[in-house]
Amino acid sequence: MSFLASAKQWARTIKRDVVALWIAARDPRVPWYAKATAGVVAAYALSPIDLIPDFIPIIGYLDDLIIVPLGIMAAVRMIPVALMEEFREKATSQAKPVSKAGLAFMTLVWILAATLLMWMFWPKAA
């Protein structure tokens, strides 16, 4: 299998697992700590806004290549195997959702960061 083919397969697996985690975060059979982790990871991964914007060279893709997969791996390990397999099956037949909570959270983070920077660098009246 070529590098490109394996990269495409990895991307499909990540997308499926994100949707599966979104489903897991709403299932009553999943432990609360796994729900919380799955919900945070899915909300961030499905949010249309990234913590580090992709247009920033190199580090802009760190969240997509490192942070999101590590979060997925951590959340998947907390969910019982049989349930995760069920959620993965559901995820393959379900459309990819968009996280409004993730959008709201990332918007809040950016507003707080902008406010902090303005407070730090705004000229002080003497």
Image: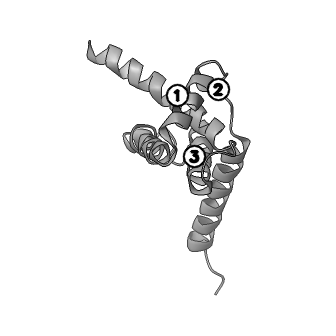
Looking at numbered disc 3 in the image, what kind of residue is underneath it? Ala
Marks 1 and 2: CB-CB under 8 Å? yes
In percent of width and height, residue 60 lies at 44, 41
Which one is earlier in the sequence, the residue at label 2 or at label 3? 3
Q: Say which of 28 and 13 sits in front.
A: 28
| Disc 1/disc 3 C-alpha distance (Å) | 14 Å
Marks 2 and 3: CB-CB under 8 Å? no
Q: Which residue is mark 3?
A: 38
Q: Say which of 120 and 62 sits in front.
A: 62
Single out the mark in the foreground, 2 or 3.
Answer: 3
In percent of width and height, residue 70 lies at 41, 45
Dot 1 crowding, Cα within 10 Å, few <14, some 14–19, many 20+: some
Residue 47 showing in the rendered view: no
Dot 2 crowding, Cα within 10 Å, few <14, some 14–19, many 20+: some
Q: Is residue 108 left or right of residue 121?
A: right
In percent of width and height, residue 71 lies at 47, 46
Which one is earlier in the sequence, the residue at label 1 or at label 3? 1
Callout 1: SS: helix
Q: Which residue is mark 2?
A: 96
User: In this rendering, is residue 93 above or below 84?
Assistant: above
| Disc 2/disc 3 C-alpha distance (Å) | 15 Å
Which one is earlier in the sequence, the residue at label 1 or at label 2? 1
User: In this rendering, is residue 76 above or below 36?
Assistant: above
User: In this rendering, is residue 118 above or below 21?
Assistant: below
Single out the mark in the foreground, 1 or 3.
Answer: 3
Q: Say which of 100 and 75 sits in front.
A: 75
- Residue depicted at 33% across the width and 19% down the height: 6
Q: Say which of 79 and 113 sits in front.
A: 79
Q: Which residue is mark 1?
A: 15
- Residue depicted at 59% across the width and 61% down the height: 113
Q: Is residue 99 left or right of residue 17?
A: right
